[in-house]
Amino acid sequence: MPAVSRTPSPHRARPVLALLALAIVLFAAPAAVPAASAPGATAPIYRTPPRVLADLALAPPTPFSILGPEHEWLLVADRPSLPPIEELARPELRLAGLRISPRTSGPSRARTFSGLHLVRVADGSERPVTGLPDDPRLGDVSWSPDGASVAFTQTTQDAIELWILDVATGAARRLVEAPLNLTTDVGPTWFSDSRELLVALVPEDRGAEPAAPTVTTGPVIEENDGKTAPARTYQDLLADAHDEALFEHYCTARLARVSLDGTIARIGTPGIVRRADPSPDGRYVLVSMIHRPFSYLVPIDRFPHRIEVWDRNGAPVYSLADLPLAEEVPIAFGSVPTGPREPAWRADADATLSWVEALDGGDAGREAEERDRLFALDAPFDGAPVTLATLGQRFNGVQWGSGDLALVSSWWWPTRTIRTWRVRPATPEAAPEKLFDYSWEDRYHEPGTPVTVEDARGRRVLETSHGGSTFYLIGDGASPEGDRPFLDAYSLSTGETERLFRSTAPHYERPWRLLDEEGQRFLVFREAIDEPTNLFGYDRGAAEGARFRQLTHFPDPTPQLRGVSKELIRYQRADGVELTGTLYLPPGKTAADGPFPMLMWAYPVEFKSADAAGQVTDSPYRFVRVGWYSPLLFLARGYAVLDNPSMPIVGEGDAEPNDTYVEQLVASAKAAVDEVVRRGVAEPGRIAIGGHSYGAFMVANLLAHSDLFAAGIARSGAYNRTLTPFGFQAEERTLWQAPEVYFAMSPFMHADTVNEPLLLIHGQADNNSGTFPIQSERFYNALKGQGATARLVMLPYESHGYRGKESVLHMLWEMDRWLDKYVKEPSEQGAAPAASAPAER
């Protein structure tokens, strides 16, 4: 198959609106699921890929590090490999955008830790943690402000328990028998005295689950009285009165203070608690409570809710707002509900409440000079709130430092800009000072993220020195030679930065936490192509060659890939846009051993600037770490891999990127193919294209509009944009505003031009916005109806990202077999061994 592109023809000389209507009709019909004996279907059975792929996919992830107060101890949490499919098959409720385990009153798909140990930062010595249960499933790990204890949860078969670790002895124990309620993600939070935790408990009198009606009691009715209420696509929404009852039953919790001696003091009244946070001085609790009426159109974060301040015993002392159902928020990017939002405590003060309110009606599509205003109100909350900042963009966050320093950031989608302002909370009349103003697309000029540190009350505040006149920034350090992370000191008096550290070849080194106020000693994550990521102490004042001191010693989880060749390559699109990608060759191979069969794996990104689109991403010195999701697994099967080749979709000025999506996509892919062929590491007819989610959408479009690839692999994608009519990805226009764009970008509409083999994989329980499982089912039906070579694999119980061991191994078996059959030369093809059950057809 020649590596040339077909000229894209967005309209195909067919009436756009008629085809859109046809597509909607096709999708409106119920999806038929053929039985295993039906023509074109095979008996469901899980399969296992070659052992080298299975071993790589099941390698345990690198442990997670959590630094304690005063930087004395590091808590290292082990992460397990993939769980068995039977875990995903346990009872699950999908309500209001949540996925709930009715057995444990917590999230049904939470990621947990399988072990803990302590590392002393000063010398790297280790202390084991004893007393953990067999087969632990730990989560919500948090240090007490004084560093003497660590709180965490343990999930059993039927409950979520609160546990405590005594750091001095390394002994862990269950703190209370009362089960926690984590359905709405309100985890244990320390009070500033380190003697109590605020938790959400399952109500003692909750009773039995509401029974489903045995007979339909009437139709489910929704009505609109002429209000304009567009909404982007959501999944797992409430569907009827029984869903509402289940949501209320399982999400209702009772807040309580739990002491280290196990004493429980229940506070307030039971309710659906969305957030609960003690004030820094421990006198108050900020609470957000969901209440009726619920919605069948939007998830829990848009439900009506009261924002209140309680005292320690649960008595309300201040009501900030009772906000209504937010079904009518405009869909323009940057639109928000009206009224107070993002309530929080000022981290550096005793009990000062802060929040933001929109000044433009929450509508980002409306012209306005002022968008948001940041307010603050001191305890006892009986005065008038003060204005700390009025912003011409949408509020993006605040980092507190002192009465003389807080950093407020704002963003704006149409211009892709971020601004950071210095405000003085103690003197709100002082005008904010703009420190940074840059495009987030322009990675080369990102100033970095301000460094924070936990204070004595356990609150994260800005790390400062020189009397508060200097703060610190950590950034990726993107550059033409790749990412080189840095640590800078920023002087508020001069507005200048001093570079304290920058990663140097042949390592990739990222500063993490400062160990002193002057930025002389800090912790750094360090890695190289063949060196796994580990944590090091770094001392700027030490002699050259002795500045790094290794603290963790995590082994290489995938030694099978040692000797892989990695190169950051650059090339150019026909229109002059600079492109990059990371080229990998199999272990022990060089370009001279090519050409190899190749897998390209990519994800399109929209830009407003061609210069920004051409900037280099990644680093040539990062460790070659693979997970189940990574195309790099196939290096072990003899494939070369071009990972993340640039697929920019650029729309400069008033142009919208998606107006020329197909043309730009094909041009980028052609440039990548031409480059790897020029280098001799690949050849036409033996290159596959793959992607996940929006990358899967890309794959289908490339097969529909070009002849560049021998085959495609598309995982969990969306293929018909009439199913996301109020926008998708970075597209703000609706279907009715830009029908030609929706048509041209939908590979479903061009199923008749897909003439390369396409493997479609999708989780049957996908909860990602827009990537409904029916997207893959209907696209497969369209391909089959056109006589295309296609295969659809639906993975039971799997969401947008797959988790079950059997599912992942089967996915790899499918991918390996597909690549073997359609990309490798016939003499190289081999059969993959079978094992033990997704429904495939």
Image (cartoon, rainbow, N blue to C red):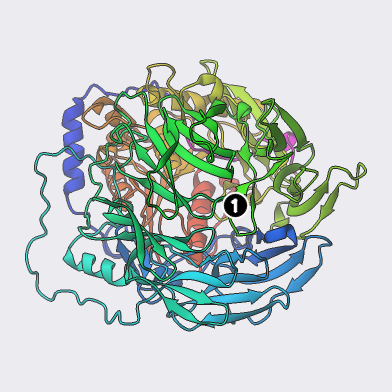
| Residue 336 belongs to the span the image colors magenta | no
Q: Nearer the viewer, residue 790 or 15?
A: 15
Give the residue at the far right of this rendering.
543
Q: Is residue 45 above or below residue 258?
A: above
Asked if residue 528 can be seen in this view, the reply is yes
Based on the displayed image, in which of its 4 quarters is residue 280 positioned? bottom right
Q: Residue at x 17, y 37 (%)?
A: 228
Name the spot of residue 440 as percent of width and height, x first.
Answer: 53, 30
Based on the displayed image, in which of its 4 quarters is residue 612 positioned? top right
Q: Amino acid at mark 1?
A: Arg
- Tally of marks: 1
Give the residue at the far front of this rendering.
383
Q: Is residue 466 left or right of residue 445?
A: right
Name the spot of residue 415 as percent of width and height, x first.
Answer: 44, 24
Q: Residue at x 74, y 34 (%)?
A: 592
Q: Residue at x 91, y 44 (%)?
A: 545
Q: Secondary structure at mark 1?
A: strand
Residue range of the region highlighted in magenta in the rendering: 589-604
Name the spot of residue 153 as percent of width and height, x first.
Answer: 53, 72
Q: Residues within 10 Å of mark 1 (few under 14, many from 20)?
A: some
Asked if residue 81 can be seen in this view, the reply is no
Q: Which residue is mark 1?
A: 460
